[in-house]
Image: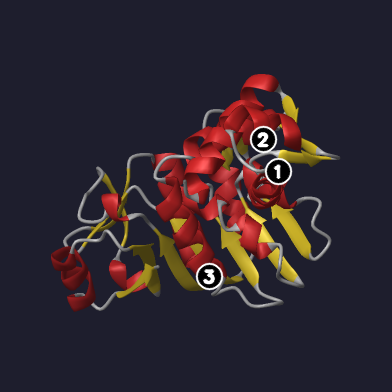
Amino acid sequence: MNFQERKKKILTAVEESGSLSVFELSDKLGMSPATIRRDLHDIAEEGLLLRTHGGAMKIENPVLTSFVAKAGSNEENKEKIAQLAAEYVADGDIIFLDCGSTVFKMCRHLKKRNGIKVITNSLPIMAELIDVPSISLNLIGGEIDKQRKAVHGHKAIEHIGGYHAHKAFIGIDGISAQNGLTAHSEHESSITSAFIKNASQVFVLCDSSKIGKDSHIKFGSLSQVNSLFTDQDLDSSRKKQLVEKGLDVVIAK
Protein backbone atom coordinates (compact mmCIF):
# COMPACT_ATOMS: atom_id res chain seq x y z
CA MET A 1 0.00 0.00 0.00
CA ASN A 2 1.52 3.33 -1.07
CA PHE A 3 1.35 6.61 0.82
CA GLN A 4 -1.64 8.00 -1.10
CA GLU A 5 -3.68 4.86 -0.32
CA ARG A 6 -2.67 4.93 3.34
CA LYS A 7 -3.48 8.64 3.53
CA LYS A 8 -7.03 8.11 2.29
CA LYS A 9 -7.62 5.38 4.88
CA ILE A 10 -6.16 7.49 7.70
CA LEU A 11 -8.17 10.58 6.76
CA THR A 12 -11.39 8.56 6.53
CA ALA A 13 -10.79 6.98 9.94
CA VAL A 14 -9.97 10.30 11.62
CA GLU A 15 -12.94 12.03 9.99
CA GLU A 16 -15.33 9.32 11.21
CA SER A 17 -14.01 9.28 14.77
CA GLY A 18 -13.05 12.90 15.24
CA SER A 19 -9.72 11.95 16.80
CA LEU A 20 -7.65 8.78 17.14
CA SER A 21 -4.37 7.83 18.76
CA VAL A 22 -1.49 6.31 16.82
CA PHE A 23 -2.21 2.93 18.36
CA GLU A 24 -5.94 3.13 17.63
CA LEU A 25 -5.15 3.88 14.00
CA SER A 26 -2.61 1.06 13.95
CA ASP A 27 -5.19 -1.45 15.19
CA LYS A 28 -7.97 -0.11 13.00
CA LEU A 29 -5.99 0.00 9.75
CA GLY A 30 -3.50 -2.82 10.26
CA MET A 31 -0.44 -0.59 9.92
CA SER A 32 2.58 -0.36 12.17
CA PRO A 33 2.70 2.52 14.69
CA ALA A 34 5.93 3.75 13.07
CA THR A 35 4.24 3.99 9.67
CA ILE A 36 1.23 5.75 11.20
CA ARG A 37 3.43 8.33 12.95
CA ARG A 38 5.37 9.07 9.76
CA ASP A 39 2.19 9.36 7.68
CA LEU A 40 0.46 11.58 10.25
CA HIS A 41 3.38 13.98 10.15
CA ASP A 42 3.25 14.21 6.34
CA ILE A 43 -0.55 14.51 6.22
CA ALA A 44 -0.52 17.25 8.86
CA GLU A 45 2.10 19.11 6.80
CA GLU A 46 -0.42 19.14 3.95
CA GLY A 47 -2.96 20.76 6.26
CA LEU A 48 -5.41 17.84 6.02
CA LEU A 49 -5.54 17.01 9.75
CA LEU A 50 -4.20 18.25 13.09
CA ARG A 51 -1.50 16.39 15.01
CA THR A 52 -2.13 15.85 18.70
CA HIS A 53 0.02 14.39 21.44
CA GLY A 54 -0.06 10.70 20.55
CA GLY A 55 -2.38 10.91 17.56
CA ALA A 56 -4.43 13.16 15.29
CA MET A 57 -7.78 14.90 15.03
CA LYS A 58 -9.87 16.17 12.12
CA ILE A 59 -9.81 19.82 11.10
CA GLU A 60 -12.71 21.73 12.62
CA ASN A 61 -12.08 24.89 10.60
CA PRO A 62 -15.07 24.98 8.22
CA VAL A 63 -13.14 27.05 5.68
CA LEU A 64 -10.52 24.35 5.27
CA THR A 65 -12.74 21.30 5.73
CA SER A 66 -14.98 21.87 2.73
CA PHE A 67 -12.12 23.10 0.57
CA VAL A 68 -9.98 20.02 1.31
CA ALA A 69 -12.79 17.82 -0.02
CA LYS A 70 -12.58 19.59 -3.39
CA ALA A 71 -8.79 19.55 -3.34
CA GLY A 72 -8.88 15.76 -3.11
CA SER A 73 -9.88 15.43 -6.78
CA ASN A 74 -6.94 14.05 -8.82
CA GLU A 75 -4.94 14.59 -5.66
CA GLU A 76 -1.67 12.87 -6.47
CA ASN A 77 -1.06 14.79 -9.70
CA LYS A 78 -2.10 18.07 -8.09
CA GLU A 79 0.35 17.53 -5.24
CA LYS A 80 3.23 16.95 -7.67
CA ILE A 81 2.28 20.04 -9.68
CA ALA A 82 2.08 22.17 -6.54
CA GLN A 83 5.47 20.97 -5.32
CA LEU A 84 7.01 21.82 -8.69
CA ALA A 85 5.44 25.28 -8.70
CA ALA A 86 6.70 26.02 -5.18
CA GLU A 87 10.26 25.39 -6.39
CA TYR A 88 9.89 28.54 -8.51
CA VAL A 89 9.32 30.68 -5.41
CA ALA A 90 12.48 32.22 -3.96
CA ASP A 91 13.03 33.67 -0.50
CA GLY A 92 11.83 37.28 -0.47
CA ASP A 93 9.39 36.91 -3.38
CA ILE A 94 6.07 38.74 -3.49
CA ILE A 95 3.53 36.35 -5.01
CA PHE A 96 -0.12 36.26 -6.01
CA LEU A 97 -1.94 33.00 -5.22
CA ASP A 98 -5.45 32.49 -6.56
CA CYS A 99 -8.19 30.28 -5.09
CA GLY A 100 -7.48 27.14 -7.14
CA SER A 101 -7.26 23.83 -5.30
CA THR A 102 -3.87 22.99 -6.87
CA VAL A 103 -2.51 26.42 -5.94
CA PHE A 104 -3.67 25.77 -2.36
CA LYS A 105 -1.45 22.69 -2.25
CA MET A 106 1.58 24.94 -2.69
CA CYS A 107 1.11 26.11 0.91
CA ARG A 108 2.78 23.07 2.44
CA HIS A 109 5.96 23.79 0.49
CA LEU A 110 5.87 27.56 0.85
CA LYS A 111 6.19 27.19 4.62
CA LYS A 112 9.84 26.37 3.98
CA ARG A 113 10.51 29.78 2.36
CA ASN A 114 11.71 32.86 4.23
CA GLY A 115 10.52 36.43 3.85
CA ILE A 116 7.92 35.86 1.16
CA LYS A 117 4.77 37.95 0.87
CA VAL A 118 1.58 36.21 -0.26
CA ILE A 119 -1.30 38.24 -1.72
CA THR A 120 -4.40 36.07 -2.16
CA ASN A 121 -8.17 36.00 -2.52
CA SER A 122 -8.33 32.49 -1.05
CA LEU A 123 -9.67 32.00 2.48
CA PRO A 124 -8.20 28.47 2.76
CA ILE A 125 -4.75 29.78 1.83
CA MET A 126 -5.10 32.51 4.43
CA ALA A 127 -6.15 29.99 7.08
CA GLU A 128 -3.32 27.63 6.16
CA LEU A 129 -0.51 30.22 6.24
CA ILE A 130 -1.69 32.65 8.91
CA ASP A 131 0.44 31.11 11.67
CA VAL A 132 3.65 30.86 9.62
CA PRO A 133 6.04 33.54 10.98
CA SER A 134 8.22 33.63 7.85
CA ILE A 135 5.31 34.53 5.53
CA SER A 136 3.63 37.94 5.29
CA LEU A 137 -0.02 37.80 4.20
CA ASN A 138 -2.34 40.19 2.40
CA LEU A 139 -5.97 39.12 1.99
CA ILE A 140 -7.71 40.84 -0.91
CA GLY A 141 -10.85 42.71 0.12
CA GLY A 142 -14.24 42.35 -1.52
CA GLU A 143 -17.30 40.11 -1.62
CA ILE A 144 -17.04 36.60 -0.17
CA ASP A 145 -18.07 33.70 -2.39
CA LYS A 146 -19.10 31.24 0.34
CA GLN A 147 -19.15 28.22 -1.94
CA ARG A 148 -15.74 28.90 -3.47
CA LYS A 149 -14.26 30.17 -0.18
CA ALA A 150 -12.78 33.16 -2.00
CA VAL A 151 -13.02 36.93 -2.38
CA HIS A 152 -14.33 38.28 -5.68
CA GLY A 153 -15.92 41.40 -7.14
CA HIS A 154 -15.01 44.87 -8.37
CA LYS A 155 -13.43 45.97 -5.08
CA ALA A 156 -11.20 42.89 -5.11
CA ILE A 157 -9.95 43.75 -8.60
CA GLU A 158 -9.23 47.31 -7.48
CA HIS A 159 -7.31 45.94 -4.49
CA ILE A 160 -5.13 43.74 -6.72
CA GLY A 161 -4.47 46.73 -8.98
CA GLY A 162 -2.79 48.49 -6.08
CA TYR A 163 -0.04 45.85 -5.86
CA HIS A 164 2.70 44.37 -7.97
CA ALA A 165 3.99 40.82 -7.52
CA HIS A 166 7.13 39.13 -8.77
CA LYS A 167 5.10 36.05 -9.66
CA ALA A 168 1.48 34.95 -9.98
CA PHE A 169 0.41 31.33 -9.55
CA ILE A 170 -3.02 30.66 -11.01
CA GLY A 171 -5.39 27.83 -11.79
CA ILE A 172 -7.65 27.65 -14.84
CA ASP A 173 -10.67 25.63 -15.99
CA GLY A 174 -9.33 25.09 -19.49
CA ILE A 175 -6.34 25.82 -21.71
CA SER A 176 -5.79 25.14 -25.38
CA ALA A 177 -3.54 26.21 -28.25
CA GLN A 178 -6.60 27.56 -30.04
CA ASN A 179 -8.30 29.62 -27.31
CA GLY A 180 -5.68 30.24 -24.62
CA LEU A 181 -6.92 30.47 -21.03
CA THR A 182 -10.61 29.90 -20.33
CA ALA A 183 -12.91 29.75 -17.32
CA HIS A 184 -16.51 28.96 -16.49
CA SER A 185 -16.89 31.80 -13.95
CA GLU A 186 -16.72 35.52 -14.68
CA HIS A 187 -15.88 36.17 -11.02
CA GLU A 188 -12.82 33.94 -11.06
CA SER A 189 -11.64 34.90 -14.54
CA SER A 190 -11.72 38.62 -13.66
CA ILE A 191 -9.62 38.02 -10.54
CA THR A 192 -7.18 35.87 -12.48
CA SER A 193 -6.90 38.54 -15.19
CA ALA A 194 -6.02 41.11 -12.52
CA PHE A 195 -3.31 38.83 -11.12
CA ILE A 196 -1.86 38.36 -14.61
CA LYS A 197 -1.87 42.10 -15.30
CA ASN A 198 -0.02 42.97 -12.10
CA ALA A 199 2.67 40.28 -11.98
CA SER A 200 6.08 40.17 -13.66
CA GLN A 201 5.82 36.42 -14.24
CA VAL A 202 2.76 34.20 -14.57
CA PHE A 203 2.64 30.47 -13.88
CA VAL A 204 -0.39 28.29 -14.58
CA LEU A 205 -1.01 25.17 -12.49
CA CYS A 206 -3.21 22.73 -14.37
CA ASP A 207 -3.65 18.96 -14.33
CA SER A 208 -3.66 17.32 -17.75
CA SER A 209 -7.43 16.70 -17.75
CA LYS A 210 -8.00 20.43 -18.42
CA ILE A 211 -5.52 20.77 -21.27
CA GLY A 212 -7.02 20.88 -24.74
CA LYS A 213 -10.42 21.73 -23.27
CA ASP A 214 -12.17 25.09 -23.40
CA SER A 215 -14.66 26.72 -21.07
CA HIS A 216 -16.94 29.46 -22.38
CA ILE A 217 -15.11 32.54 -21.01
CA LYS A 218 -11.85 33.48 -22.74
CA PHE A 219 -9.76 35.69 -20.47
CA GLY A 220 -6.08 35.29 -21.33
CA SER A 221 -3.63 34.37 -24.06
CA LEU A 222 -0.78 31.87 -23.93
CA SER A 223 1.66 34.72 -24.54
CA GLN A 224 0.84 36.08 -21.06
CA VAL A 225 2.03 32.86 -19.39
CA ASN A 226 5.67 32.15 -18.58
CA SER A 227 5.21 28.45 -17.79
CA LEU A 228 2.50 25.83 -17.54
CA PHE A 229 2.97 23.22 -14.81
CA THR A 230 1.14 19.96 -15.44
CA ASP A 231 1.43 16.19 -14.95
CA GLN A 232 2.89 13.22 -16.78
CA ASP A 233 -0.51 12.17 -18.16
CA LEU A 234 -0.48 15.03 -20.67
CA ASP A 235 -1.09 13.80 -24.22
CA SER A 236 2.04 14.36 -26.34
CA SER A 237 0.09 15.91 -29.23
CA ARG A 238 -1.52 18.48 -26.93
CA LYS A 239 1.83 19.32 -25.41
CA LYS A 240 3.28 19.78 -28.90
CA GLN A 241 0.48 22.19 -29.85
CA LEU A 242 1.13 24.36 -26.80
CA VAL A 243 4.92 24.32 -27.27
CA GLU A 244 4.52 25.31 -30.92
CA LYS A 245 2.59 28.36 -29.68
CA GLY A 246 5.64 29.32 -27.61
CA LEU A 247 4.43 28.11 -24.21
CA ASP A 248 6.94 26.58 -21.79
CA VAL A 249 5.35 23.31 -20.58
CA VAL A 250 6.94 21.81 -17.46
CA ILE A 251 5.99 18.28 -16.41
CA ALA A 252 5.85 17.41 -12.70
CA LYS A 253 7.36 14.00 -11.97
Label 2 neighbourhood size at 10 Å, few (<14), some (14-19), many (20+)?
some
- Give the number of the disc on residue 199: 3
Above or below residue 152? Residue 246 is below
Assign a secondary structure to mark 3: strand
Rendered residue at 60%/48% (across/down): 121
Reading the chain from its start, which is encountered first: label 1 or label 3? 1
Q: Position of residue 119 (x, y in %)?
A: 65, 58
Q: Disc 1 and disc 3: Cα gap in Å? A: 46 Å
Kind of residue sitting beneath label 1: Pro
Query: Residue 222 at what x, y percent from top left?
Result: 29, 68
Q: Real-space Cα distance between discs 2 and 1?
A: 6 Å
Task: Identify residue type, mark 3.
Answer: Ala
Give how far apart the Cα atoms at labels 2 and 3 are: 47 Å
- Tell me the element at label 2: helix
Question: Quick one: label 1, few (<14), some, or many (20+) residues within 10 Å?
Answer: some
* Foreground disc of the pair 1, 3: 1
Looking at the rendering, which quadrant does residue 77 occupy?
A: bottom left
Relative height, residue 103 to residue 57 (above, below): below
Query: Which of the labelled discs sits on residue 77, or is there none?
Result: none
Q: Which residue is mark 1?
A: 33
Locate residue 223 relative to residue 47 in the image: left or right: left
For the residues bearing labels 1 and 3, Cβ distance under 8 angstroms: no
Q: Give the side of residue 36 with respect to residue 69, left or right.
A: right
- Residue 129 at x, y percent in the picture: 72, 52
- Crowding at dot 3, Cα within 10 Å, few <14 / some 14-19 / many 20+, comes out as some
Left or right, 33 with respect to 168, comes to right
Question: 94 or 162, which lies in front?
Answer: 94
Residue 46, visible in the rendered structure: yes
| Residue 162 is at least partly visible in this image | no
Front residue of 47/135: it is 47
Q: Which residue is mark 2?
A: 26
